[in-house]
């Protein structure tokens, strides 16, 4: 029985962000922007969606008088990501 | 390279629906990208490698040429904690990403530092006690004690030097440091059977191979990465 893939994660940029964050403890917004090659505006929108879903925590602070945004994955986000990968594997291993 | 970047940019901007295989490929690609972003400067390793090597060689020259500096050369290791704090703060500020390995390794090196200072405290106390026994023995028998405590201090330090070095080398998949850690342990075994002069020489060699050389290689790698990043950002 196929389960529906999580629509929050089944989008390129959001999945890319979650894949980066699953491998690290925390990352700056600029790091995510650099690795995904996305525009700041688009990335901000997708990060907000992930935050609203409770998948990531976003910490806004100042570093050397400049605003700094730090993102880290939550336990809900880890669970959702694991479920997503498991479901993907089911899709790929089942005969079509 | 630019072609690949352009494709990724389009890929991200268009927000097209992914197939299952594309999703898995994207996950693998991003995880690898995150892994490739851990680049540490080698400044701390260079500083400590050079410092321990210099301290050991100066102590060796004191014994060899029978002179004494007005201060204990190993006190420089205490002074070096100050620049180390500044280096650590600066490196932490510059890092855009913090991996789980970073946190564990920070604790391992902190534990190593505490361990070294505890070992210095223990050996100084035992050395003080042993010194008075050795003098008493000499006064009573007129002979020098055949056991010299100082010759058994180096293996203890080398044993400690090897541990965080080996773990860091293994965790970061950085072979020069891994082999440096193993070299410290080989020297640890050798120094049990050698005189204090050879012990000091091997300690200097261990510091150079475990920290100084890997530090230089890390710094070269870090500068290369920074240069590549600067070119990509132009």
Image (cartoon, coloured by chain):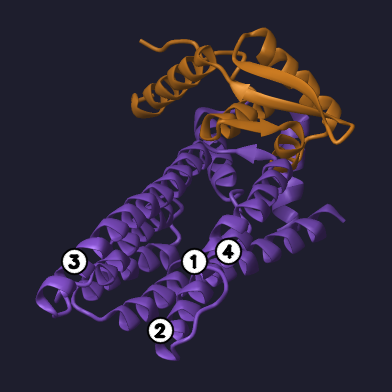
Question: Which numbered disc, 3 or 2, marks the residue that appears first in the sequence?
Answer: 2
**Residue beneath label 3, please?**
B136
Q: Is residue B112 above or below residue A58?
A: below
Q: Which residue is mark 2?
A: B63
Q: Which residue extends farthest bottom?
A: B65
Residue B106 tag number: none
Have a look at marks 4 and 2 and say if they share a chain.
Answer: yes
Q: Which chain gets the orange colouring?
A: A
Which badge, 3 or 4, comes first in the chain's sequence? 4
Q: Chain of mark 3?
A: B
Which secondary structure, mark 1?
helix
Q: Position of residue B11 (x, y in %)?
A: 71, 37
Residue at image point 71% right, 39% down? A31
Nearest to viewer (mark 1 / mark 2): 2
CA separation, marks 1 and 4? 17 Å
Q: Which mark is residue B211?
A: 1
Say which label, 4 or 2, has the lower sequence index. 2
Depth check, mark 1 against mark 3: the one in front is 3
Q: Helix, strand or loop at disc 3?
A: helix
Q: State the residue in front, B84 or B105.
A: B84
Mark 1 vs mark 4: which is more N-terminal? 4
> In the image, B30: left or right of B155?
right
Looking at the image, residue B101 sits to the left or right of residue B42; the answer is left
- Residue B54, x across and y down, in percent: 53, 76
Q: CA distance from mark 1 to mark 2?
A: 25 Å
């Amino acid at each position: 029985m196929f389960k529906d893939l999580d629509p929050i994660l089944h989008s390129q940029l959001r999945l890319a962000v979650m894949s980066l964050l699953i491998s690290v403890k925390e990352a700056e917004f600029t790091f995510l922007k650099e690795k995904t090659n996305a525009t700041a505006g688009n990335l901000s929108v997708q990060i907000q969606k992930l935050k609203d879903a409770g998948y990531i925590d976003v910490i806004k602070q100042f570093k050397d008088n400049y605003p700094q945004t730090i993102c880290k994955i939550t336990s809900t986000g880890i669970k959702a990501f694991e479920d997503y990968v498991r479901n993907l594997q089911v899709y790929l291993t089942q005969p079509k | 390279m630019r072609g690949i970047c352009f494709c990724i940019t389009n890929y991200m901007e268009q927000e097209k629906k992914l197939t299952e295989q594309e999703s898995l490929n994207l996950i693998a690609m991003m995880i690898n990208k995150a892994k490739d972003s851990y680049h540490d400067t080698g400044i701390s390793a260079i500083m400590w490698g050079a410092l321990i090597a210099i301290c050991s060689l100066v102590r060796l020259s004191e014994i060899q040429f029978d002179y004494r500096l007005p201060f204990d050369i190993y006190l420089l290791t205490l002074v070096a904690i100050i620049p180390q704090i500044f280096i650590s703060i600066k490196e932490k500020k510059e890092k855009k990403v913090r991996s789980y390995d970073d946190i564990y390794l920070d604790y391992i090196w902190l534990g190593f530092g505490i361990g070294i200072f505890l070992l210095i405290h223990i050996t100084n106390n035992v050395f003080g006690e042993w010194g008075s026994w050795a003098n008493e023995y000499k006064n009573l028998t007129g002979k020098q004690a055949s056991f010299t405590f100082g010759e058994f201090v180096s293996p203890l330090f080398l044993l400690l030097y090897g541990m965080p070095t080996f773990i860091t080398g293994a965790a970061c998949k950085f072979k020069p440091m891994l082999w440096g850690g193993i070299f410290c342990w080989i020297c640890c075994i050798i120094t049990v059977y050698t005189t204090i002069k050879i012990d000091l020489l091997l300690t200097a060699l261990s510091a150079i191979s475990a920290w100084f050389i890997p530090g230089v290689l890390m710094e070269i790698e870090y500068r290369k990465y920074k240069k590549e990043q600067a070119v990509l950002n132009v």
